[in-house]
Image (cartoon, rainbow, N blue to C red):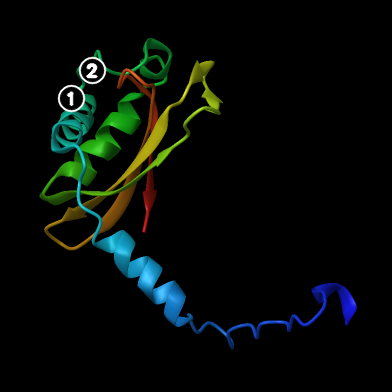
Amino acid sequence: MGWFGRGQRKKRAPVGDRATESDVRHAYRLLLQRDPDPARTKALREILEAYARGDEPLAVLPLRRSYFTPLGRALMGERLKGLREFKFVTCDDFGTRPPERHGERVARVCHYRLETADETRRYVSFWLRADGVVVDFWSSPE
């Protein structure tokens, strides 16, 4: 019987790097998820554009703005050059147990995909308070 309990059998693990049918269905649903808040998406894109231009986006927490550097702004400017798509991926809502980042409670983290004309893809995540203020954002390669 072992630790599996009475009458239960151990499920077979997928072989190598093969995804199960359930994995594929879950990934497909995530890819097809519609943007629940296009206005938020537009506002977050405008924040990135303002950041790249050297402006001080007021919808970003002052502590986070204090970390802005000329190099970071230049890199974001390069990443936004030839931007073809800024697409919603998903949001992680934290409900009643929000974590903290930079001393602020984070209500959700929203993830977006940037795609440029040369098909370079990056992902940007925004940590948001309940009132929509950006506590932090982070860009990472595909």
Residue at 48% x, 34% y: name it: 94
In terms of image quadrants, where is residue 127? top left
**Nearer to us in this view, 17 or 68:** 17
Q: Amino acid at mark 2?
A: Pro
69 w.r.t. 90: above or below? above
- Placement of the C terminus among the 4 image quadrants: bottom left
**Nearer to us in this view, 97 or 90:** 97
Where is residue 14? Give x, y as percent: 58, 84
Marks 2 and 1 close (CB-CB < 8 Å): yes
Q: Decide which of tag 2 and tag 1 comes sooner along the chain.
A: 1
Q: CA distance from mark 2 to mark 1?
A: 6 Å
- Mark 1, residue position: 50
- Placement of the N terminus among the 4 image quadrants: bottom right
Residue at 72% x, 82% y: name it: 10
Report crowding for label 2: few under 14, some 14 to 19, many 20 or more residues within 10 A (C-alpha).
some
Name the secondary structure under disc 1: helix
Q: Amino acid at mark 1?
A: Ala
- Mark 2, residue position: 57
